[in-house]
Structure formats: structure tokens, C-alpha cells
Amino acid sequence: MEVLRRHAPFNAMREDALARLAGALKLRYFAKDSVILSPESGRISALYIIQRGAVKAEEPARVSLNNLAGSFTEGECFPVGALIARRPTTLRYEAAKDTFCYVLDEGAFHAAMAESPEFQAYCTKRLAALLALSTRGTREAYAGRAASELSMASPLRTALRRGPVTLPETATVRQVLELMKSRRIGSVVLLDAEGRPAGIFTQTDVLDRVALAGEPLDRPVAEVMTRAPASLPASAPLSEAAQLMARRGFRHVVVLEGDALAGVISERDLFGLQRLSMQGLRKEIGQADSVDALAFAAREVRGLGTAMLAQGVAAEQLTQFVSALNDAVTERAIALAMRAHDVASVGFCWMGLGSEGRNEQTLATDQDNAIIFPDPGSDREGLRARLIAFADEVNRTLDACGFPLCKGNIMARNPQWCLALPEWLDRFDDWMRNADPEALLNATIFFDFRALHGDATLVERLREFLLAKVKDRPAFLRQMAANALQVRPPLGLFGDIVVENDEGGTIDLKKQASRPFVDCARILALASGVGEVSTAERLRAAGPRIRMSEDDVATAVDAFQFVQMLRLRSQDSLERGGGSAEPNRLDPDTLNSLDRRILREALRQARKLQNRVALDYQL
């Protein structure tokens, strides 16, 4: 039991259920290179749990969809699927080194399945069950940090920015105004003879009761202050202060620690907290009236992403939220640029490309965009020049908002990517006919496109053209497939993660882990005539058309989303001054044992998807 508790799902099982499972185990030894199970072993009648060592699993055939080309390590189980289905295994399991396995016979296995929901979930949906455990761990890991960050559930005392600023109620209006000016504050609490709050004097009181009323500045402030100010205990949540302000029309609430004055919470303090909400941040972006204001709002998108990480929001939803807010930043940048450029009547469409086109933007991303416009019939170059000048301002605004200019110059201000619809059709057709290395590179970026602003029908016509033409270009798809297989997931002989020593013992999560999913999903979608753009939706839509089982599709999507989550966590760590200097690089040794295990499984699924593409195109 002590050994099993080090690994999922056993660490989540009830004590009595784990005890019964452990009591049914037998220990077996397998020498290096010995065959543990194979298709010739017949119907599987036991589950094997690796105590120590490593087991290599591979298909006897040279190429197979099921060939994971990796190994199982300590704490992992096999062959779960064959045991549940009561059939022989399709893989050959060999001891990669001297190995000890716990063996659980079929009867005890099914008894454990019936008794433990955690064990059953793992056996029927292994990766999904592991991800659920990882998500719980992520929430717990972020809990300490989240607790130190304010939310509307935080107590009032945590939001007090400064100690209380007070004067006795015998002070004059002039004395109060001089103090407000020197301290740059909007309110002062007036105390009675016993040091308790007798009233509050705010900027609103200055206007309504002094300036507009024509009262002299030497008048006692007690005569014009707001008496018996609204107050709450310091332990009350911020939401209660917000409700009190909303109900009674106040802009300030006095905060008390027992009977003593602790400070004042203003409406502005609460507004600052509510910026980190989808609705509030979206509104702030839409109302930004300058590049500086828009850049400030764009920076808060990262704060929202961090908050969602702490809440355990799934990577797919989180990247969609981030992409949606980044879309709003782009739309506002376009609106600001339109003030100086007469392009509204052109009927153009601003397109997002790459990760933005797929709705998969993370917390660190550069610009990939283009413009498509209707053919004017004449003076095409004149119209292009106007749009390029407009696009240059948009690109520079987005750069100021934290989206660096694309190093490859794939931006709308580049004349190559500011084209009329017929030019885009010719460009796509040329890439599919020639398929040289540059064309293949462009296809991986430009074939992931969607409309962000303007006439979306132009984009849909381009998509219809692409899907219709690519079916007649099998040679192009085959070359795309070969290109997608150039980068293999970093798995070693014993199933562990192989790091790049010249990069500080790290792996590139974007290039080596997420790109295989993205590239394979694109190829499968294009070959199947699927118009979806995001990686997950491409797999879900194309899967049934290419006879991928529902479980295989779900597992591939889960694996991809876990990699995305690791990228988000790595980027968040970099933002806070920790982790690798590169936003997509990760040292696997920094992962806990569960997340490292899930990453290995995710990389296996990426390799499995590549094997399917290799088989489809005989590569």
C-alpha cells in the first residue's frame, strides 16, 4: 500500500478499497528483454502494475496506429483495455530492464473497479482521470497565491491601501481641504472626542455643501460633513461593501476593527478589483480612448488568465477566453486607427492567423494577421496602399499592447499579406500546387485563419475555396504530413522525457509537444473537408470521418489541452520572475510526479497521432 500510494489512481482510493486491492497482489520478476505479454498470450486475465523497472510496449507490425513507441514506468498499469474487453492484447510488452510487477487477477480487478470510483475512472478513461487529479492539484498549488490576491470574497481589511486619515470634528473646512490636497485623497474621517468616527467629508461634500452652497472655508467641518457614515466590520467581504454602496448611493464605506477605525474603502478601490472579470475587462477594452489606455487594459488580460488558472479553469476554455479578450483588443486598435484612416467603406476583413486564428492564444503571443479586401476592379494598388498605412498603425498599437511585431513579418502591414480576394485565392492555389518548403511553412500559418473584424463573407469564400481545392491535391497533403513528422515528441527508450541539454535541460512545449497535435489535426481536417480551425474542434469533427474511436479522440484532445495548460503555467511563472527564460520552455524535473506522468502520456498520444498520419500517407 505504501508503494501504491505514491502513484495515481491509488493515492485517491479509499483506505479500505486500497487495502483489499493490495491484499490481492502477487509480485513477479521479469528479466531485461523478456516478453511479459504479447498477442500470442491469449485472452488477458490480469492487470500488471510496475513496482520498479520499465516496460516497453510496441506493436509487432512495423507501423501501427497503436504503436506508442514508448515505455511504461513505475506506478503505471497495463494492459487495461484488453483486460476490460476480455481479449488478447494487440501490443507486445517487454521488460526494458530488470522489472518487478504487481499482478492483480481478473476477479480482484473487477472487484476493485466496482468498489472504487477513482480506480474505475482511471481504468475506463485513464488520461481524463489523471487530468482531474492534476487540475485539483493545480488549484491547491495556486490556492496560497490566490488567497493573497483580492477577490470580492476577500475581507475588507485585505483591501485597505493605507491607514485612516483623520481630523477631529472641531477642524475647519479649510483644514480638511488642505489635508486632502497634501495627502492626495478623496475623503477624511472626522473623529469625536472619544476618537470614534463622527462623520466623513468627501469631494462630493466639497461640491454640494461648500462650493455650490457658497459656504466659508472657516466654517466648522462638523456642520457640512456626512454624519453617521456607512460602516462595516473589517471581516466583512468586499462584496458587502459593494452592495451597500449600490443600495444607498455612497462612494465610501468606513471600515471598523472592533470599535476602532481601520480605514476607508472607496468605490474606486472596488472598481479596481472588478477589472479582473470577463465583463468588466471587456467593457474597459471597448472604452479605451487612447493607445495608452488600451495597452493598460491589455496587460490586465494576463491577470485574468492567472486568476482563471488559480480557479482551475480548463486550458481549452482559458485559451478561448484569452483569445476573445485579445480579439477585443484588436478590434479596439482597429477602431482607434480608423479615426485617422478612411478605410471603413472599403469592406475589408482583418484576419487572425496561427494560434489567434485557432482561438488558442496563451499568455505570451506575438502578432500573426492579414487583410483580405474585395477586388476594386481598378486602382487595386492605390487601395492596398491605404490599407497598408492603416494596418501599420494597428500593428504598432498591438505592439504597444504587448503583442510583439512578428519576426517573420506575417502582419497586415506587409504588402504580401494585404491582398484582394482573387489574390488570396491565387496565393493559396500556388502553395498547394508547388508545395516547396516555404509554401509548406506558410500553409501551417495561413491555413489557420478566421475573421476578426469586417466582412466575414470574404473569409468564408476563401475557406470554401481551400477545402474544395485541397481534396484534389493529395501530393500537397502528403508533403504537409511529411513536414508534420519532422518534429517528434521527446520520448526516450524507457518512456521518459528526453531534454535538450544545450537548452538547460528543458523541452520546448510549443515545438515538441503542442505542434504535433496542431499539425496533425490540420492535416486530418483538410483531408476530411472539415472547416473548423481550432485543434480540438478539428479532431472532434475529423475523428469520426477517419474512424477514430470516440475515446481516442477524447484522449488526444485531453492530451493536447494538458500541454496547453503546462504552457500557460510556464508563462505565468515567467511573468512572475520564475521558471525558464523562454515562455514555452519547461524543465520536466520541476513537475510533480503526477504531472510528469501525464506529460509522458500526452507525448505518447502526440506520437500516436503522428503514427496515424504516417500510416495514412505511407510515410
Image (cartoon, rainbow, N blue to C red):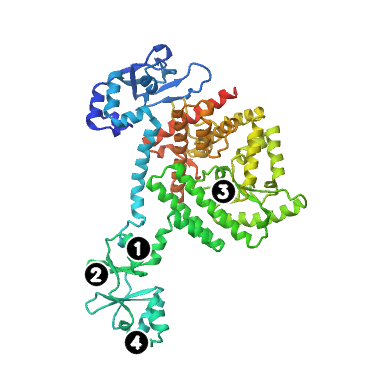
Q: What numbered label is drawn on residue 260?
A: 2
- Pointer 4 with pointer 1, Cβ within 8 A: no
Alpha carbon of mark 4 to alpha carbon of mark 1: how far? Answer: 33 Å
Q: Of the residues under marks 1 and 2, which one precedes in the sequence?
A: 1
Q: What numbered label is drawn on residue 242?
A: 1
Q: Of the residues under marks 1 and 3, which one precedes in the sequence?
A: 1
Residue sitting farthest toward the front: 457
Q: What numbered label is drawn on residue 403?
A: none
Residue 377 % position (x, y): 76, 49
**In-image side of 352 versus 592 (left or right):** right
User: Quick one: SS at disc 2?
Assistant: strand
Alpha carbon of mark 2 to alpha carbon of mark 4: how far? Answer: 27 Å
Q: Of the residues under marks 2 and 3, which one precedes in the sequence?
A: 2
Q: Amino acid at mark 2?
A: Ala
Residue 222 % position (x, y): 30, 82
Dot 4 crowding, Cα within 10 Å, few <14, some 14–19, many 20+ = some
Camera-side mark, 4 or 3: 4
Q: What numbered label is drawn on residue 366?
A: 3
Q: Amino acid at mark 1?
A: Ala
Q: Of the residues under marks 4 and 1, which one precedes in the sequence?
A: 4
Q: What numbered label is drawn on residue 219?
A: 4
- Pointer 1 with pointer 3, Cβ within 8 A: no
Q: At x 41% / y 79%, what residue is drawn?
A: 207
Q: At x 64% / y 35%, what residue is drawn?
A: 440
User: Quick one: SS at disc 4?
Assistant: loop
- Residue 1 seen by the camera: yes
Alpha carbon of mark 1 to alpha carbon of mark 2: how far? Answer: 21 Å
- Pointer 2 with pointer 3, Cβ within 8 A: no
**Quadrant of the snapshot with the N terminus:** top left
Q: Amino acid at mark 3?
A: Asp
